[in-house]
Image (cartoon, coloured by chain):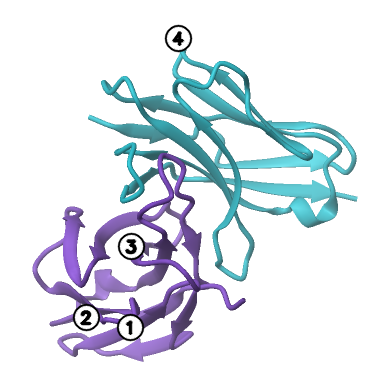
Amino acid sequence: AQKITQTQPGMFVQEKEAVTLDCTYDTSDQSYGLFWYKQPSSGEMIFLIYQGSYDEQNATEGRYSLNFQKARKSANLVISASQLGDSAMYFCAMRLQMDSNYQLIWGAGTKLIIKP
Amino acid sequence: DAGVTQSPTHLIKTRGQQVTLRCSPKSGHDTVSWYQQALGQGPQFIFQYYEEEERQRGNFPDRFSGHQFPNYSSELNVNALLLGDSALYLCASSYSRQGEFGEQFFGPGTRLTVL
């Protein structure tokens, strides 16, 4: 069964430090995709970064990078130089289809708090 | 360019009542997905609408139904509300012909409280 596991319910990080949020996944599919979303207290899901299972290089988007280890089925999010505005819930999600009409399976999330 | 909009923002209902939530997709998008997010949990996929039809459905009872209109907007209906239906309901839109990477854009959600 497809499943996403985020083992860190909450994290406190000092401002300007790097932070790694863990995500492991379980699927028997050969083709899949992994997303990270940020959810501020306002509730809206904000897309951060995407990694396809066949992408050979780790995805990067500005201060966000995805440490993709396919054999270990992990897709950790790394935020460099954290900022106070990074405080939010972070969700890892996996797509079940590789066409545009896909559904997402989500982890339970990690609450990240950046300390000044 | 307006993003995904949802209405209402908040809603309070009592057990047994019926509720309708609305979603307008981002301009140019033709697919709408609905998710339920209980407090402290990740979202759960309810269903997805494309070309005015329900194309995929998650593990939700028939009390949850939906509709998509010709302008691609969508409604989520929940009948016979239970206390456990209290959650944030998220709508996401996407474009069906975007290929492998069709990012889903999310609305701000509707917070439903069932008393």
The residue singled out by tag 1 in the image is B21
Which residue corresponds to mark 3?
B33
Q: Amino acid at mark 1?
A: Leu
Q: Secondary structure at mark 1?
A: strand
Report, in whole angstroms, how far the alpha carbon at label 2 lies from the one at label 1: 6 Å
In the drawing, what numbered circle is on residue B77? 2
Q: Quadrant of the C terminus of chain B?
A: bottom left
Q: Position of residue B108 (x, y in %)?
A: 53, 73
> How far apart are the two marked residues, 2 and 4, measured between alpha carbons?
42 Å
**Amino acid type, residue under disc 2 in the picture:** Asn
Q: Report how far apart the C-alphas of labels 1 and 4 lie in the structure.
A: 42 Å
Residue B115 visible in this rendered orientation of the protein: no
For mark 2, name the chain.
B
- The first of marks 2 and 3 along the sequence is 3
Of pointers 2 and 1, the one earlier in the residue sequence? 1
The picture's colour for chain A is cyan
Chain label for disc 1 = B
Parent chain of label 4: A
Q: Which residue is mark 4?
A: A71
Which element type, helix, strand or loop, lies under badge 3? strand
Q: Are marks 2 and 1 in contact (CB under 8 Å)?
A: yes
In the picture as drawn, the residue positioned furthest to the left comes out as B62
The chain assigned the colour purple in the figure is B
